[in-house]
Amino acid sequence: MPPPDTGDEVVNVLLAAGHQVRIAVDEALRASVGLTLRRFKVLQLLADIGPCRLRDLAEAVAVVPRTMTETVDSLESDGLVARRSHPNDRRAVLLALTPAGRQALTVGRRRRAETVADFTRHFTAAQRTQLVELLASIRRHGPPEPESRAPESRAPESGVAPQ
């Protein structure tokens, strides 16, 4: 993949570093638990919010339900996610992590943390603080995130309390 060319050296380096981290995490997850980063994020979301409808998951990650169906189908066939009846709506189906899904998530989180740490281990505490401040400044001074993509607007409303 060619390096980013936004016309701004800082943004180019930022985008390239983010891409490099994502690739490394994706490869580490594939090697350790057989999951892509996308599938791992779905497991993580289910762990964070508890059982929910497929539509809620799709909305939370801003994809069309059909795309999420394919992801969930593969997670279910791997025994990581299970479908079960909604306790308050006989027509609805809830998705939940299985014990194997929780185990894959635990191992994947550990492996992800190890991989990410490799990128920043060489920073001193002062360098880490400065870099965080600089990156936070970029976020503060950029345009606001569209409402449909803002993290707080992506919480699913399944009607079922997280477990």
Image (spheres, rainbow, N blue to C red):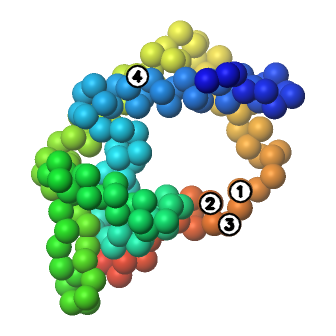
Residue identifier under label 2: 149
Q: Which mark is residue 145?
A: 1
Alpha-carbon distance for marks 2 and 4?
27 Å
Amino acid type at circle 4 is Thr
Determine contact: label 2, label 1, CB under 8 Å.
Answer: yes
Q: Number of callouts in the render? A: 4
Q: Earlier in the sequence, mark 2 or mark 4?
A: 4
Q: In this view, does 9 lie above or below 91?
A: above
Query: Where's residue 8, x and y in %?
Result: 85, 27
Q: In which quarter of the image is the C terminus?
A: bottom left
Amino acid type at circle 1 is Glu
Alpha-carbon distance for marks 3 and 4?
31 Å
Q: Judging from the image, what secondary structure is the residue with disc 4 in?
A: helix
Determine contact: label 3, label 1, CB under 8 Å.
Answer: yes
Q: Would residue 147 appear left or right of 87 to someone viewing this image?
A: right
Q: Earlier in the sequence, mark 3 or mark 4?
A: 4
Determine contact: label 3, label 2, CB under 8 Å.
Answer: yes
Alpha-carbon distance for marks 3 and 1?
6 Å
Determine contact: label 1, label 4, CB under 8 Å.
Answer: no
At 23% from the left edge and 33% from the top edge, which residue is drawn? Answer: 33
Query: Where's residue 3, x and y in %?
Result: 69, 22
Alpha-carbon distance for marks 1 and 4?
28 Å
Determine contact: label 3, label 4, CB under 8 Å.
Answer: no
Residue identifier under label 3: 147
Q: Residue 115 carries which label?
A: 4
Question: Residue furthest toward the right?
Answer: 7
Amino acid type at circle 3 is Glu
